[in-house]
Amino acid sequence: MSRAFAQDNLRAQILGIPGVGIQPTDADWQKVGELCLGGTRSNVARGEFTGVELSFMGLNSQNVHNVVFRGLLKPWETYTGAKITWIDLIQADYDTHLQQGIAAGMLDFDMAEMGAPFEGDVCGNGLASEMPDWVRTQVDMDDYVNYLKGPVGTWDGKRYRVSIDGDCHTFSYRTDVFSDPDLAAAWKAAGGEGAWGRPRTWQRVQAATKFLKGKKVGGKDVFGYLDPAKGAGGFGFYFLASRATAYAKHPDDKAWLFDVDTMKPRVNNPAFVRAIQDVIDALPSEPADQINADPDTTAFQQFVMGTGSMLSWWGDVGPSARTAPSVVGNVVSFDILPGSDDVYNSKTKMWERLAGGPNFAPNMAFLGWGVYVMASVDSDDKKKKAAWSAAAHLGGKDISLWTSVYPTGLQPYRNSHFNIPEWVAAGYSEAFITSYLDANKNSYNHPNAAIEPRIPGIFRYYSAAEDGLARIYAGQSDAQTGADAIAAAWENLTDQIGRDKQIELYKASLGV
């Protein structure tokens, strides 16, 4: 049997476990982990890590992330002899736990599931172990989509990250809602602009959200866009950013969060203030008590369960919509984030309408999860190899296809993940998966993508923004006043961390 045929056969085999539309169990995760041990066997002898104990910090969220990793790594533990202790964090506690360890100079983990935005805090402080060459070969890093090949995962020219995810926000919408003839007639009668259909700009999202208040489809209440108005340890700021990028990210300017030469925040400029005002104006048309809905609520308790017709989120929504529990799997489609009829030019301080039409600027929110090994293991060669072997197993080429196809908290991030026939053979409809994969691929490759800075303390900025947004959404200040307060908090943070260094790192993260 040729190696290529064997590889194809393995991928087809694991994609059938347990079958699209069925929620995987621990037994399924372990079976997939066992079948994907080929890379480990090529570099590690059976029992080589007997006596090694590793601690792994990651998320325990929506029954995915660490919960899945336990099963995928159990066969690795059995084969190698190593044992893993798990440190499970909810997303809202992640940054706090990490920063406490950094401040104390005592990390309580050997390995971490970590997003690229934290590289400034961890790699920049010399806390991570440099990746050995054999790991790069085992995980086939040449297969990564371009935006994850570097500088993401690197610091000072050294590589530290095994990618297990590729993050961006995409737009999910209900096709039944935006093709409903009764809604189309009501939209026209109400004087709605253009034909009723899926909105492609935030201006149209706003109009559709207000129009859908009180409307029904199939006898059930239907709402428009779903805003997560409750914070989530900094992660909630991404959703305001996804409303803002089309307004704030000009095609002629790589920056959108800060001015590159001064680190002056842009979070209180007219583009961000408009996005904040959009949320204020939309919330009364969204489900009751939406002000207490965090990001997980909007995706997994609302959208995939049939509440709301539009959502910006990471790619988890795709596999989740097709795996129980979900009631919208047959009526969901995807696209890049909506654009804007005009875009704010931070250099001229003017709004502009582009000759080519609406401005699109997909938000590369969080730059994907990766597995990082801490420098604390470097003094023990056996433990260091064990930690990197575990990371390489989780980030392997075949196992990563499975984690992209099934609900794991991870989304496609390799060129080989965009082979539509593999997904169709696994059980996805061609139309659904083409829409889903194109939304991700077209976001990753968009020429005006909004790239997140990997600067120290980035989640301190985001958390400060969440605090300010909570006050705004609660009616304690207007959009501009609240945004000014957020900008002032960001300025203080920059001064505390060191403005000159932040400017240097911000420029490096944007490639300017």
Image (cartoon, grey):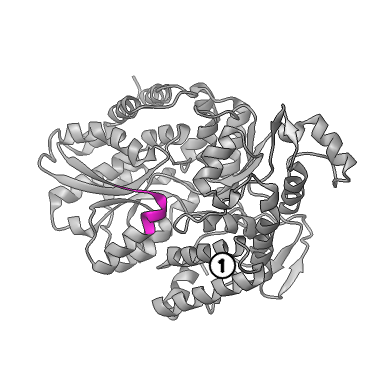
Residue 492 relative to residue 474: left or right: left
Q: Specify the principal SS of the magenta part.
A: helix
Residue 83 in the image: x percent, y percent? 17, 40
Residue 120 in the image: x percent, y percent? 38, 65
Rendered-image quadrant of the N terminus: top left
Kindly identify which residue carries mark 1: 257
Look at the image and give the residue range highlighted in magenta: 88-95
Q: Is 305 drawn above or below residue 16 in the view shown?
A: below
Q: How many marks?
A: 1
Occupied quadrant, residue 197:
top right
Nearest the viewer among 108 and 8 is 108
Q: Residue at x 56, y 67 (%)?
A: 257
Q: Secondary structure at mark 1?
A: loop
Q: Inspect this view and state whether residue 186 appears.
A: yes
Residue 238 relative to residue 407: left or right: right
Residue 3 in the image: x percent, y percent? 34, 26
Q: Residue furthest top?
A: 1
Q: Residue at x 54, y 41 (%)?
A: 299
Residue 506 relative to residue 355: left or right: left
Q: Residue at x 34, y 52 (%)?
A: 161
Nearest the viewer among 122 and 184 is 184
Q: Inspect this view and state whether residue 250 appears.
A: no
Q: Is 234 drawn above or below residue 81 in the view shown?
A: below
Residue 55 in the image: x percent, y percent? 22, 48
Residue 251 relative to residue 265: left or right: right
Occupied quadrant, residue 437:
top right
For label 1, the crowd category at 10 Å Cα-Cα, with few meaning under 14, some 14 to 19 and many 20 or more, is many
Q: Residue at x 35, y 65 (%)?
A: 121
Task: Judge whether residue 189 is colored magenta.
Answer: no
Task: Judge whether residue 89 is colored magenta.
Answer: yes
Q: Is 264 drawn above or below residue 407 in the view shown?
A: below
